[in-house]
Image: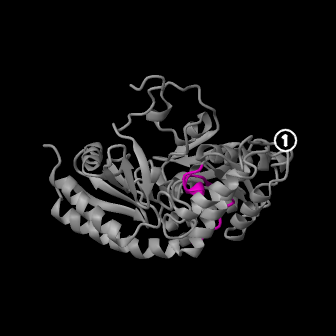
Amino acid sequence: MIENLMDTYKRYPISFSKGEGSWLYDNDGGKYLDFAAGIAVNVLGHGHPEIKKVMHEAIDNVWHVSNLYHIPEQQKLAKKLCDISFADKVFFCNSGAEAVEGAIKTSRKYHFEKGDKDRTDIITFKNAFHGRTLATLAAGANPKHTEGFGPLPSGFENIELSQQQLEEKISNKTAAVLIEPIQGEGGIRLTPKEDLQMIRDLTSKHGVLMILDQVQCGLGRTGDFFSHEWAGVEPDIITLAKGLGAGFPIGAILASTDASSGMVHGSHGSTFGGNPLACSVALKVLEIIDEEKILSNVKSLSEFLLAGINDIIENHKDKITSVRGRGFMLGIKCEVENTLIAETALNNGLLLVPAADNIIRLLPPLNTEKNDIEEFFNLLNITLENLPR
């Protein structure tokens, strides 16, 4: 237990003093390959010079004024996000959980304003993770996360992902269907494109909104900017956070004009959401993703990464058995405890993230280079060869 901090995290006994690219350095000069990226946050690695530059410039200007006033940086960022997506409207907040909460509110208010006041239910899916607020806990319905925090808000139906289940549960009380195109915390479970298309067809048929939680899997992590693009569907609402600020806190709700029509003056708000500093950073992140051809980097190197992991699996089948996911969001299925692998990797200079279903998550920066991936192969081999027995 760390004095003066609530004991909510089981922290590794290490702290970092410097970061550069895909590498972090501890207070004693130790070097660590970061394939955790702050849990999918540091999409451009550590210490990117352009991000540092824009932060310094923003600090010399206005940091915060609140949404009582026009914020030019916010308006530019909203336009950019709409230009590269299906969306017409954006609401800015500070985190993924806030974004999902806002998306839930947006969907319910949409139906309320349409005169369907009974349409309040949100359908979600097993193994989902949507955040740690009370409503997002209720949406995820994971007993490990909800225990001791009841009563939780009502209006959520958590089901298995199947057409039969969805057809049975969707009704004239359903406001929205909420799903992650790739579950992160739930164990890197890829939602098949056929299922995303099925959900879109059923929600459209029944006048229900489709919300895609892309807090972890969006912002280029799959090789596409948005993780639904490869499925050829167009949602009504998307939630973003994590990588949008590349380390600086910012979240966003993207919606069509129709889906956002209920969000009128006074219906929702955020004191810090969309402040000049956060929006300046996020604008630069989007610019770098485009100018440095980050998506192409993910698409090309993810194949190299996947092939190398499969080679390692062949040599360590008693410890790891398979790999799944897409782009730079991969999960290695473990035969031994995933936490044991993560802890041993840390001791060998490699940062990894455990997830549900005994999975090790790989979430490297999107600008990771080939030589970093080759070093990852080396460190993972060393880790697996030296696991405590």
Stretch of the chain drawn in magenta: 232-248
Answer with left or right where residue 224 lies relative to residue 177.
left
The colour scheme used to paint the residues is: one colour
Near-viewer residue (368 or 200): 368
Q: How many marks?
A: 1
Of all residues, the one furthest to the left in this rendering is 389
Amino acid found under the numbered disc labelled 1 = Gly
**Residue 114: x %, y % from top left:** 83, 50
Residue 138 located left or right of residue 355: right
List x then y, in percent, for residue 290. Answer: 59, 73
Q: Secondary structure at mark 1?
A: loop
Which residue is label 1 attached to? Answer: 266
Whether the magenta-drawn stretch holds residue 257 is answered as no
- 120 lies left or right of 261: left
The image quadrant of residue 243 is: bottom right
Q: Nearer the viewer, residue 137 or 48?
A: 48
Vertical side of 130 occupied by 49: above or below: below
Image quadrant in which the C terminus is located: top left
Instruction: Residue at 54%, 26% (x, y): give it.
Output: 149
| Residue 244 belongs to the span the image colors magenta | yes
CA neighbours of label 1 inside 10 A, class few (<14), some (14 to 19), many (20+):
few
Residue 140 visible somewhere in the drawing: yes
Residue at 25 percent across and 46 percent down: it is: 347
x and y percent of residue 59 in the render?
Answer: 68, 51
- Quadrant of the drawing holding the N terminus: top left
Q: Is residue 211 visible?
A: no
Query: What x and y, as percent, mark residue 297?
Result: 46, 74
**Residue drawn 35% across the image and 40% down it:** 14
In-image side of 10 versus 380 (left or right):
right
Of residues 190 and 252, the one nearer the viewer is 252
